Amino acid sequence: MVFVDQTPSNPGRLKRAGISRPARPVREPVNSYEWPCPGDLTARAVEPARERRPRLLTRRLPKVAIATALFFGLGFGRVLQLVHARAWRLALPSRQTDFALYALVLLSVYGLILLLLIQLTELHGAPHWVGLTLSLGWIGLLVLFFVWAPWLLTDKLVTRRDLLP
């Protein structure tokens, strides 16, 4: 059963009979926070922790991250080569230039990601139609990349026309 509450604190609000909870007591707003110790003591306790932070790690971390991404990212080109070689039943011999090709494909992927990030920062606040137009360009660019990379990695044994749907 539902009825309209006519109390001065809740005029015109619906209220369920027998199920409604009692109103919570009004709390006073907090004007100040009481800390277990004065603020300047807390600040003094934090400052030495900042000084103890190893600066060597913060300098090396970006270099280690880039080296790791490059080392493990080389597998992307190898996987792309294996997928297309097995799909087309090609026997590809190992060559001296394979790692250079893997690196070229990986750097192309990184270049595409960098281009996308730059575009997104520049397009912030641009009209909607600009993003839609650029998305068509990105579709074409990705189709070109995924035709070029397997064609290059399979020693040009699979034609570019065969790589398109």
Image (cartoon, helix red, strand yellow):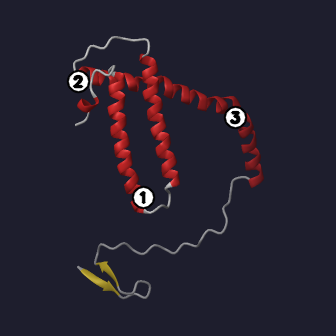
Locate residue 66, reporting x and y percent.
55, 29
Classed neighbour count for the residue bearing mark 1: other residues with Cα under 10 Å, few (<14), some (14–19), many (≥20): few
Residue on which the image places disc 1: 130
Tally of numbered discs: 3
Element type at marker 2?
helix
**Quadrant including the C terminus:** top left
Amino acid type for the residue under numbered disc 1: Val
Residue on which the image places disc 3: 53
Whether residue 38 is visible: no
Amino acid type for the residue under numbered disc 3: Arg
Residue at 65 percent across and 33 percent down: it is: 58
User: Depth-wise, is mark 1 or mark 3 nearer the camera?
Assistant: 1
**Image mark for residue 87:** 2
Residue at 34 percent across and 34 percent down: it is: 146
Q: Depth check: 149 or 32 in front?
A: 149
Q: In this view, does 119 lie above or below 32?
A: above
Locate residue 46, reporting x and y percent.
72, 44
Choose top left, top right, bottom left or bottom right for residue 140: top left
Whether residue 108 is visible: yes
Q: Depth check: 106 or 159 in front?
A: 159
Between marks 1 and 3, how big is the CA–CA gap?
Answer: 45 Å
Choose top left, top right, bottom left or bottom right for residue 108: top left
Say whether disc 1 or disc 3 marks the residue closer to the N-terminus. 3
Do the numbered discs 1 and 3 sit on residues whose CB atoms are within 8 Å? no
Say whether disc 2 or disc 3 marks the residue closer to the N-terminus. 3
Q: Depth check: 44 or 27 in front?
A: 44
Locate residue 51, reporting x and y percent.
75, 37
**Quadrant including the N terminus:** bottom left
